[in-house]
Amino acid sequence: MGRVKQKYNRREAEMRFERVYEIVEGDQCIYCGMPNDGKSDHQPPVYVLHRFADGGLVTKKAIRERFGRCKLVPCCTICNMGLGAFHGSTDNERRQEIVNWLLVDDRYPADKIVLDIANQLIEDHLQGRRGIEIYEFPGVGRVIYISALVGLIEGEFGGPDEFPDWLTVTQSELADWLRGAPRRKSKYFLDMANLESYELVPDARDDPRGQFKAQ
């Protein structure tokens, strides 16, 4: 008798594979350095283990032989949404997946103007000409996340401790602003990524970049 394919239920899958993951302690997102506010990311994603099990039983040994050490790492809500179920082999691959949502889209000439305006708003704020209302503009968040993620990817920074003062200050202020209203973090990701709804991009959650289609 063949295996019965199980429909993916994230909560059930997390409970099933919970003991496979080793918890990595920390209060900063491992990808961008923002406060993680107690949130975590599964490496590899739970969805990947669900597909690996393929409706059958699977042992910890088999999982570790295939994927290596499985970790639950500190991760902010925005980076977590940017990753979805992306299965990268390194943290820099994961950072690249996140930042791809935020980089200038050459298909839309006005997109570069958004980041130019955001940079000016940040400069005005740091010089005392504007207040924390600058964070309401999603372009400001994009500049902050792009600067951190690309800087870490390219080796400009060895970690958040090496971020320039302006980035440390704006990350802290952005984190405070994002905590100021329910669901503001998830809404901010959608605004930064120019998405109407996370539900409209199932690949962001279950099959990013079509990476599972050939399996």
Image (spheres, rainbow, N blue to C red):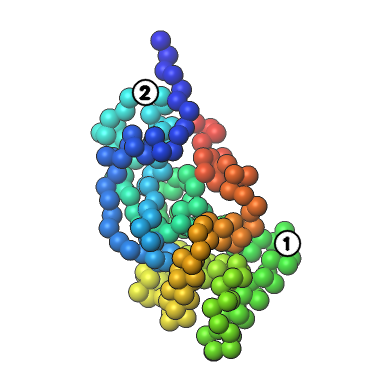
Quadrant in the picture for the N terminus: top left
Residue drawn where x is 53% and y is 40% of the image: 207
Examine the rendered structure and indicate whether residue 168 appears above or below residue 185: below
Q: Position of residue 173 (x, y in %)?
A: 46, 75
Which of 26 and 186 lies nearest the eye of the viewer? 186
Task: Look at label 1 and name its amino acid.
Answer: Tyr
Q: In the rendering, which numbered label is found on residue 108?
A: 1
Which of 40 and 211 lies nearest the eye of the viewer? 40
Examine the rendered structure and indicate whether residue 120 appears above or below residue 13: below
Residue at the extreme top of the image, as rendered: 1
Which of 91 and 166 lies nearest the eye of the viewer? 166
The answer to whether residue 151 of the structure is visible from this angle is: no
Residue at the extreme front of the image, as rendered: 181
Number of numbered tags placed on the structure image = 2
Residue drawn where x is 61% and y is 80% of the image: 121
Circle 1 sits in a helix, a strand or a loop, which is it? Answer: loop
Q: CA distance from mark 1 to mark 2?
A: 46 Å
Circle 2 sits in a helix, a strand or a loop, which is it? Answer: loop
Q: Picture quarter containing residue 103?
A: bottom right
Q: In the rendering, which numbered label is found on residue 70?
A: none
Q: Position of residue 43 (x, y in %)?
A: 37, 47
Q: Picture quarter containing residue 27?
A: bottom left
Query: Where does label 2 land, which residue?
Result: 56
Examine the rendered structure and indicate whether residue 70 appears above or below residue 74: above
Q: Residues within 10 Å of mark 1 (few under 14, many from 20)?
A: few
Residue drawn where x is 55% and y is 68% of the image: 141
Residue drawn where x is 39% and y is 34% of the image: 12
The numbered mark, 1 or 2, whose residue comes first in the sequence reads 2
Q: Residues within 10 Å of mark 2 (few under 14, many from 20)?
A: few
Q: Position of residue 135 (x, y in %)?
A: 56, 72
